[in-house]
C-alpha cells in the first residue's frame, strides 16, 4: 500500500469505520473514499455496481453492517441475516469484479459456538451450536468470512477476515434497543445519575441529542419518569438485564482500527494459510485476551460516571453467551497488541458522550 492508493471504507461514519478512517489519515493515506447510507445504499446491488464502476478502489475495508445488542438481535432476526448478507454479497462481489488488490472484512466474535472452549481460538469455528439470540447475525458473518476464504482459494484473491471482540468508542450508537452492552450501560448509568440527582435538565439534554421511545427534550417530567422506569431506571436504583454473571471482553475502537490497518499493511492471505493441509479458519481474532463480568463492568462504569444508586440485575431476562473470550495469540504472533485498558477506555467514552451532547446543545442554540 502507498499513500496514493484509493481506499474505500464502507461504513466510514460508524464506530469502526470512523476509527479506521482516522487511523489511515494519521498514517498519511490521502485518497480515502466514503459514502453515507443516504449517498449509497449497500443493499442496492445496482447502486454498489455503479459506485465501483466510477470509483475503482484499490483497497476495500468492509466495516458496514447492520448491528445491535442482544435485544435487537433476538427481535429483528430476519433483518440481521438478510441485510448483512446483502451488504456483504454486493461489496465483496464488486470487489472481485473490479480486481480490488486487497479486501478487509470485519465480522464479530459471535460467530463462535455458544459452548466453545475458552479462550476461543480461530479453529473453534463451526464446531458446535451457536448462541440462539444472535444466530442470524452470526450466520451472516460466517458466510462473509467463508466468501472471502472461498474467493481466495478459487481465484487467488487477497481477502482477509477479522473477528473483533465487543467494541466501544467514539461514534458508537447509544440507542438503548439496538446498541451493544457498554454504550447502553453508559447511557443508562448517566440518565440514572441524573434522575437520582433530580437533574431533569440533564435528562432533557440527553433526549434532545438522542430521543428515546418517542421522548425528546420537550416532554414532561411525568413522561420522563414513566419511560425511564420502563427501561429499568428508577429514582433510587438501576435495573439491568440478566444475572450479571456473563464474562465479556471489550476492545477500544481505535485499537481495533490500528489492528486493521496493521493487517492491511503487513498481512496477506498467503501468510495465513501456510502449513494448512485444508485451507480454512484463516481469519484473525482481534481483542485483548482479557475479560470482565457484566456485574463488575456495571460497578466500574458507575464509578466512572459517578452514579451512586443501587444496581440490580433481573435474572428473568436473558444473559446471552456466558463467556466469549478470544484467543489473540495469532494476532500477537503477527506483531500487534492492544494499548487502551478498559477503565481508561470507559473514561474516554463517557467524556466523548458528554461532550457530544454539549456540542449538539451549542449547535441547537446557534440554530435558533
Image (cartoon, rainbow, N blue to C red):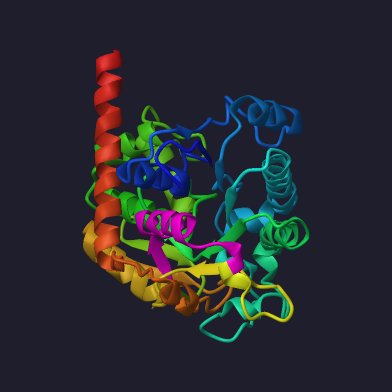
The residue positioned farthest toward the top in the image shown: 368
Q: Identify the residue at image location x=51%, y=34%.
A: 214
* Quadrant position of residue 32: top left
Q: Residue 240, percent across and down?
A: 45, 64
Residue at the image position 70 percent from the left and 64 percent from the top: 135
Q: Main secondary structure of the magenta part?
A: helix
Coordinates of residue 74 in the picture (x, y in percent) = 66, 58
Q: As drawn, is 241 to the left or to the right of 131? A: left
Image coords of residue 251 (percent x, y): 40, 64
Residue 255 covered by magenta stretch: yes
- The residue lying toward the viewer, choosing from 243 and 81, is 81
Task: Please say if 260 is above or below 359.
Answer: below
Q: Is residue 317 something one can see in this rendering?
A: no
Assign the C terminus to one quadrant of the image: top left
The extreme right residue here reads 154
Residue at 28% x, 23% y is 363
For residue 316, which quarter of the picture? bottom right
Total tally of numbered discs in the picture: 0
Whether residue 85 is visible: yes
Residue placed most toward the observer, 4 or 203: 4
Does 144 sit left or right of 254 as displayed?
right
Q: Which of 247 and 15 is in front in this view?
A: 15
Residue 24 colored in magenta in the image: no
Magenta residue span: 249-270
Side (left or right) of 37 relative to 223: right
What x and y, as percent, mark residue 90? 72, 41
Amino acid at each position: 500500500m502507498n499513500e496514493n492508493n484509493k481506499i474505500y471504507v464502507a461504513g466510514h461514519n460508524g464506530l469502526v469505520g470512523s476509527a479506521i478512517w482516522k487511523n489511515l489519515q494519521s498514517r498519511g493515506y490521502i485518497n480515502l473514499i466514503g459514502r453515507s447510507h443516504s449517498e449509497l445504499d449497500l443493499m442496492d446491488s445496482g447502486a454498489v455496481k455503479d459506485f465501483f464502476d466510477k470509483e475503482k478502489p484499490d483497497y476495500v475495508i468492509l466495516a458496514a453492517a447492520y448491528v445491535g445488542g442482544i435485544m435487537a438481535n433476538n427481535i429483528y432476526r430476519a433483518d440481521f441475516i438478510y441485510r448483512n448478507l446483502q451488504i456483504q454479497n454486493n461489496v465483496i462481489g464488486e470487489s472481485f469484479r473490479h480486481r480490488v488488490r486487497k479486501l478487509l472484512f470485519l465480522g464479530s466474535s459471535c460467530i463462535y459456538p455458544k459452548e466453545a472452549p475458552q479462550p476461543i481460538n480461530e479453529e473453534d469455528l463451526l464446531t458446535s451450536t451457536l448462541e440462539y439470540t444472535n444466530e442470524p447475525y452470526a450466520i451472516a458473518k460466517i458466510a462473509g468470512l467463508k466468501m472471502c476464504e472461498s474467493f481466495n482459494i478459487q481465484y487467488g484473491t487477497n481477502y482477509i477476515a477479522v473477528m473483533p471482540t465487543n467494541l466501544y468508542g467514539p461514534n458508537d450508537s447509544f440507542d438503548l434497543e439496538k446498541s451493544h452492552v457498554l454504550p447502553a450501560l453508559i447511557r443508562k448509568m448517566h440518565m440514572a445519575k441524573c434522575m437520582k440527582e433530580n437533574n431533569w435538565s440533564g435528562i432533557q439534554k440527553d433526549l434532545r441529542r438522542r430521543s428515546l421511545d418517542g421522548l425528546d427534550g420537550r416532554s414532561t417530567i411525568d413522561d420522563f419518569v414513566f419511560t425511564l422506569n420502563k427501561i429499568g431506571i428508577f429514582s433510587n436504583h438501576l435495573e439491568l438485564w440478566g444475572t450479571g454473571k456473563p464474562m465479556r471482553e471489550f476492545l477500544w475502537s481505535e485499537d481495533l482500527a490500528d489492528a486493521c490497518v496493521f493487517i492491511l499493511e503487513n498481512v496477506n492471505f498467503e501468510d495465513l494459510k501456510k502449513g494448512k493441509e485444508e485451507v480454512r479458519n484463516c481469519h484473525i481474532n482481534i481483542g485483548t485476551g482479557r475479560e470482565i463480568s457484566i456485574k463488575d463492568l456495571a460497578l466500574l462504569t458507575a464509578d466512572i460516571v459517578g452514579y451512586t444508586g443501587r444496581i440490580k440485575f433481573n435474572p428473568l431476562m436473558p444473559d446471552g453467551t456466558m463467556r466469549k473470550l478470544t484467543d489473540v495469540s495469532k494476532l500477537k504472533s503477527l506483531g500487534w497488541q492492544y494499548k487502551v485498558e478498559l477503565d481508561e477506555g470507559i473514561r474516554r467514552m463517557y467524556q466523548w458522550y458528554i461532550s457530544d451532547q454539549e456540542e449538539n446543545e451549542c449547535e441547537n442554540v446557534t440554530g435558533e
